[in-house]
Image (cartoon, rainbow, N blue to C red):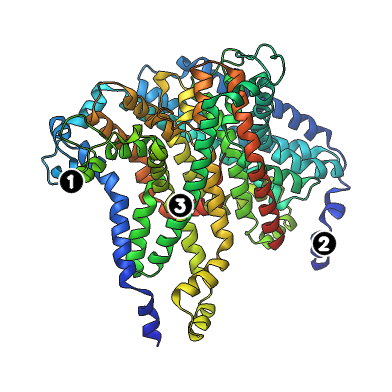
Amino acid sequence: MSTVTQTAVQKPPKSGKAQSPADPKRIVIGAVSLVLVGWFIGNGFLALAYYPEWFAFGVPVLDKIIQALLAMVLGIGGAVLFFYCMNVFVQGLPGRLGQFLMPYAWILPGYFTIGLLLLYPTIQTVNYSFANEDSTAYVAPFYKNFQEVLSSDEFIRTIGNNVLWLLIVPATTVVIGLLVAVLADRLAPKGEAVSKSLMFMPMAISFVGASTIWGFIYDYQSGDTQIGLLNAIVTSFGGEAQSWLTIDRFALNSMLLMVIVVWLQVGYAMVLLSTAIKGVPDDTLEAARIDGATEVKIFFQIVIPQMKGTIITVFVTVFIMVMKIFDIVYVMTNGNFKTNVIANLFFQELFVQRNAGKASAIVVILLVAVIPVLIYQVRHFKREESER
Amino acid sequence: MSKADTEYKRSWVSIIVMTVLCIIWLIPTVGLLVTSFRNIDLINSSGWWTGLLGPFTAENYAGVFAKTDMGTSFINSIAVAVPATIIPITLAAFAAYAFTFLEFKGRDFLFVSIVAVMVVPIQVALQPMLDMLGPRGINISGQYLAVWLLHAGFGMPLAIYTLRNYMTTLPRSIIESAKVDGASHFQTFWRLVFPMSTPAIAGFAILQFLWVWNDLLIAMMFLKPQNATVIVSLSSIMGTQGQGWELLTAGAFISMLVPMLIFFSMQRFFVRGMTSGAVKG
């Protein structure tokens, strides 16, 4: 008994399934049911979109919930059934072929979704960036859209704004997050938990919700009463009330928008950095203290180097988020008063100017800008993987 | 020494600075909350800080439901967010299993490509998707289905990445012994690996749910007005001339209700999801 188990463990593919012959019945049943299940899921979902009245009882609230429930049943049930049929089919194949195809079958639906919704459109966007405003014909010369985009003052200013965002927001978020993580580490456990929870809470708030919250702080009324907190503070110190979001001097209004993002993201930085700080071994700190190093010196020369990896992760994550920042600029200023950013410019080009060609050119430029970050991420991942 | 050791960590500086920081971090939200319960005349004539002790009224909330589509939008948000969270998880879990427990050619390359697409900004995909899902294509734009699909696709790389990273930490011996007992991969996945991955699934689910719930761009582009989510409704209240702070503040709180509830009830999973590599394009 034990010898049998051992051979099975040592070389399962060869001793077990490799010699199993093809099973035509399984192949046929598997293939037919695969097609049927796929057909049923596809048409089920389309029916939800094309004929919502089929699933409606005339009570709007109930109908919407029913649609969502049906989608979940179709989605989960369909996926499980689909994989089950695929399993039957692959197992019916002659041993080695089945073994070979199995993993690909398992990643197929996930990859199909990524291919259909991310890879295909990305390639198509590059394609459209050489085409006219409704993507029906190529422009001549082929770089016309890029030429027009790159030569417009608005685009140059927008790029400048994005660079400013990238210079300020990730670094500020990391520094404040680090400060909070260090300080919270020195509170009593209860205080630490409560204060971290409070600072983390904005992470659950949408950009639009946050814009409402801060719009109220930056509010400006033309009369004497100021209900915005910022103006109330300024006037109480004898200053003049300002219409803050229209002041583009030193990009003040852009910076006020950045404050909102920092407010939202510090919690994320703090949580990750806090975990990293707790991971710094106490004995290295103790040893430094015995050697008479100051707390500041310990922090910069011992703690920081040991959490470098986490600091970079947080920085890169916030960096990527900021590159495509949209919601806040869209709802607060809509890019007016020199606050525009790439993602909003794209949106305006697509829906206001109705020029899909130029809009695509703008995101292609964004895509090119992302490539270095992408390469960095892949390298970082490979390094981490080899350390596993 | 041991007592001093625990005492050492607390310091007055950090207590004072953290208290100040927490207050600064809370003030914006408190301001909005207080305002949403004040009468419109009071809102326009005095700062919210003068009304901290009342009088309060719920009329703004009643007004939001009566004068805007916030009520319908709330249901829409649920109908959009729940399937858009659950569906990608199922597909991702199968793929993650294959990446963790099956050997195959090109596995490393395919997984690295997942890491790469996580960084790609979603704006890159939007215009062709408008074509493909719109009248020029299969014509489902405006319906929930379009948004479910898009969020499933955009969330998929992160879902596979998160689940696979978690599955690599599961004890391999259990999977091996299931194999020896003659379980097929489907059974091993369904009975063992999927249930054991609950913490990672919950972590990802919360992140994805909040992303979909809080999303503006996709909902705005791909949902018809009757199907608009709370975030879209909120942004249109913001853009509407003449509608005052009273509707906006109440609307904002309605849009934050569900995320806040999730945040405070499932913070542990939320943090876990956050820390497991939350890059999303």
Occupied quadrant, residue A93? top right
The amino acid type found where label 1 is placed reads Ser
Q: Which of marks 2 and 1 is in front?
A: 1
The amino acid type found where label 3 is placed reads Thr
- Which of the numbered marks, if any, corresponds to residue A173? 3
List x then y, in percent, for residue A60: 36, 20
How many marks overall? 3
Q: Nearer the viewer, mark 3 or mark 1?
A: 1
Q: Is residue B86 above or below residue A268?
A: above
Residue under the point 79% across and 63% down: A5
Mark before the other along the chain sequence, 3 or 2 = 2
The amino acid type found where label 2 is placed reads Gln
> Front-most of A112 and A221?
A221
Mark before the other along the chain sequence, 3 or 1 = 3
Labels 3 and 2 touching (C-beta < 8 A):
no
Disc 2: which residue: A10
Residue under the point 56% across and 34% down: B152
Q: In this view, does A119 lie to the left or right of B106?
A: left
Which SS class for mark 1? helix
Occupied quadrant, residue A338? top left
- Which of the numbered marks, if any, corresponds to residue A236? 1
Q: Is residue B26 above or below residue B33?
A: below
Mark before the other along the chain sequence, 2 or 1 = 2
Residue under the point 53% across and 15% down: A354
List x then y, in percent, for residue B193: 62, 52
Q: In this view, does A341 lie above or below B135?
A: below
